[in-house]
Image: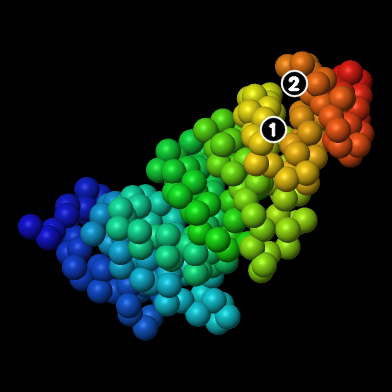
């Protein structure tokens, strides 16, 4: 029951043996095993592939092994037990995150869903790469999550300006579909002044006439900074 048929050579493939070879000391045997796993989409190899990636010493030039394993993992499917989240969180610089992003950009729903899940892992470098990717992918489903991240109270261990700049840019990249989401967020009474200014600034960058009737009342706001930012945002929109 643990055999698969190699259609090219008409020989049985022992999946248990192939998986065991992932832990071989010989790099070529490991790469060959990964190639076989990818070719036959051996689903049982998903967790062993993650374990392999987690244990790779990237300082010793093993990035090729990590990327090969990540590519194979993308072919056999993502496990549902959360282990891939741990692997990506701890070892994303080894290539697994980049593979995930690449597949999300090629309209893989599974990869996109995993990126969205990983936005809940609070690691600044990881989040910034994912947010950049979400902006480039442009799926409107991520807009509420990006706004949540933009308005999230800043943890002490992140570069707040860098993080907000990347998140704002991603929202702006998505464009017109983000306008009403921003308008709705701007109407929240719990926003700080800085958060209000940030959202007004994004509406100006989006340059959508749709936001004009929602910005106009802010010209009479009691806060002078709000009025100034609103004037500038409306100028940006009128200049289009």
- The residue nearer to you, when weighing 190 against 21, is 190
Task: Where is residue 51? Give x, y as percent.
Answer: 36, 71
149 displayed left or right of 14: right
Disc 2 crowd rating (10 Å Cα; few below 14, some 14-19, many 20+) is some
Q: CA distance from mark 2 to mark 1?
A: 9 Å
Q: Are marks 2 and 1 in contact (CB under 8 Å)?
A: yes
On residue 214, the disc is 2
Residue shown at the point (13%, 58%) measured from the top left: 3
Task: Where is residue 209? Give x, y as percent.
Answer: 78, 16
> Which quarter shows the N terminus?
bottom left
Task: Where is residue 19? Give x, y as percent.
Answer: 26, 68
44 displayed left or right of 22: left
One can see residue 152 in this view: yes
Picture quadrant of residue 217: top right
Residue shown at the point (82%, 26%) measured from the top left: 218
225 displayed left or right of 71: right
Q: Which element is circle 1 on?
A: helix
Residue that sits furthest to the front in the current view: 222
On residue 97, the disc is none
Q: How many marks?
A: 2
Residue shown at the point (58%, 51%) measured from the top left: 130
- The residue nearer to you, when weighing 86 against 62, is 86
Q: Is residue 220 above or below residue 24?
A: above
**Residue matched to label 1:** 186
Q: Which element is circle 2 on?
A: helix
């Amino acid at each position: 029951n643990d055999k698969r048929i190699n259609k090219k050579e008409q020989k049985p493939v022992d999946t248990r043996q192939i998986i065991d070879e992932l832990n071989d000391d010989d790099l070529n045997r490991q790469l060959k095993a990964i190639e076989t796993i990818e070719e036959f989409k051996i689903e049982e190899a998903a967790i062993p592939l993650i374990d392999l990636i987690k244990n790779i010493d990237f300082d010793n030039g093993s990035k090729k092994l990590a990327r090969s394993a990540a590519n194979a993992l993308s072919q056999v499917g993502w496990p549902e037990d959360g282990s891939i989240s741990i692997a990506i969180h701890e070892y994303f610089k080894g290539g697994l995150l980049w593979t995930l992003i690449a597949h999300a950009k090629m309209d893989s729903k599974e990869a996109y869903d995993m990126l969205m899940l990983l936005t809940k892992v609070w690691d600044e470098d990881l989040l910034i790469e994912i947010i950049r990717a979400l902006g480039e992918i442009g799926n409107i489903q991520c807009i509420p999550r990006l706004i949540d991240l933009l308005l999230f109270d800043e943890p002490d261990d992140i570069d707040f300006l860098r993080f907000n700049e990347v998140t704002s840019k991603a929202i702006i990249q998505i464009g017109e579909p983000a306008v009403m989401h921003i308008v709705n967020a701007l109407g929240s009474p719990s926003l700080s002044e800085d958060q209000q200014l940030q959202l007004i600034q994004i509406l100006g960058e989006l340059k959508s006439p749709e936001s004009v009737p929602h910005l106009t009342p802010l010209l009479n706001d009691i806060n002078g900074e709000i009025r100034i930012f609103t004037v500038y945002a409306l100028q940006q929109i009128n200049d289009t």
